[in-house]
Image (tube, grey):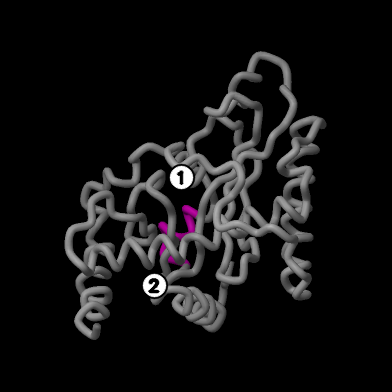
């Protein structure tokens, strides 16, 4: 993740250039890495909603598809939002270490002052513009998953090793992916907008239950996206 003020500002600028979404420093989502049954009493914890055994891996990427944060240790049955709540990056955002910077997530994440999710039922032109910008900007994480898994097909085909070795391999593939990105390596062919394993409804509507946490999102809509609508 960006750490200095200069790095944070540069990351925000790169994300803003995608679809004019302000203050974003990362797009977050989880992807399932297929594994063989680990056996033992806890084996079923690794069976995900699609019915295969996996490790549910949380990834944050930047606008250049580089992986800036990864958590690879949770069984496939774990919910994305629960993985985030128990991660170090969650604590850093809760403690304000990134200032007013934002993460972009899908509806599986609860909206927070630092986590922007799409609106369930946008009504006004500004709300529609917010959703369009949020979805287009967040799409970099799906593109990241697609490029990452095409570079390292084992991440899609499955890893038939012990869980601890799987975790090490996944993180190593993330590091090598970043090296490839930093060296402007040619992306694998057949890039698509969405990840091969994505399930459009695998999160439910958790992110739409926000309590009093939607104030920052509403402020963005009112102060930023409404102004963009007015200019047009």
Q: Quadrant of residue 53?
A: top right
Q: Secondary structure at mark 2?
A: loop
Residue 9 point in image, percent of width and height? 49, 81
Q: Residues within 10 Å of mark 1 (few under 14, many from 20)?
A: few
In this view of the protein, which residue sits in the foreground, 212 or 152? 152
7 inside magenta stretch: no
Q: Residue furthest top?
A: 41
Q: Quadrant of residue 2?
A: bottom right
Q: Residue at x 75, y 59 (%)?
A: 175
N-term-proximal mark, 1 vs 2: 2
Q: Residue at x 39, y 72 (%)?
A: 21
The quarter in which the C terminus is drawn is bottom left
Residue extent of the magenta highlight:
90-97
Residue 59, compared with residue 36, is above or below; it is below
On screen, residue 5 versus residue 186, left or right, reads left
96 inside magenta stretch: yes
The quarter in which the N terminus is drawn is bottom right
**Residue that carries the numbered disc 2 in the rendered image:** 21
On screen, residue 4 versus residue 100, left or right, reads right
On screen, residue 107 versus residue 55, left or right, reads left
Q: Residue at x 54, y 83 (%)?
A: 6
On screen, residue 120 versus residue 39, left or right, reads left
Q: Secondary structure at mark 1?
A: helix
Determine contact: label 1, label 2, CB under 8 Å: no
Q: Nearer the viewer, mark 1 or mark 2?
A: 2
Mark identifier at residue 85: 1
């Amino acid at each position: 993740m960006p750490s200095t003020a200069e790095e944070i500002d540069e990351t925000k600028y790169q994300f803003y250039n995608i679809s004019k979404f302000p203050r974003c420093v990362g797009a977050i989502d989880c992807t399932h890495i297929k594994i063989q049954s680990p056996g033992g009493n806890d084996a079923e914890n690794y069976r995900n909603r699609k019915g295969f055994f996996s490790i549910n891996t949380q990834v944050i990427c930047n606008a250049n598809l580089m992986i800036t944060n990864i958590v690879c240790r949770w069984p496939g049955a774990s919910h994305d939002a629960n993985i985030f709540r128990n991660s170090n990056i969650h604590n850093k955002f809760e403690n304000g270490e990134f200032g007013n910077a934002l993460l972009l997530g899908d509806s599986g994440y609860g909206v927070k002052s630092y986590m922007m999710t799409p609106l369930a039922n946008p009504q006004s032109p500004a709300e529609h513009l917010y959703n369009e910008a949020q979805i287009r900007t967040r799409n970099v994480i799906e593109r990241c998953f697609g490029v990452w898994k095409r570079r390292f097909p084992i991440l899609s085909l499955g890893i038939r090793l012990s869980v601890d070795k799987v975790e090490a391999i996944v993180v190593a593939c993330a590091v090598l992916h970043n090296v490839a990105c930093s060296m402007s390596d040619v992306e694998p062919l057949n890039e698509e907008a969405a990840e091969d394993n994505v399930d459009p409804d695998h999160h439910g509507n958790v992110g739409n239950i926000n309590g009093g946490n939607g104030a920052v999102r509403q402020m963005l809509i009112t102060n930023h996206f409404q102004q963009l609508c007015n200019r047009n």
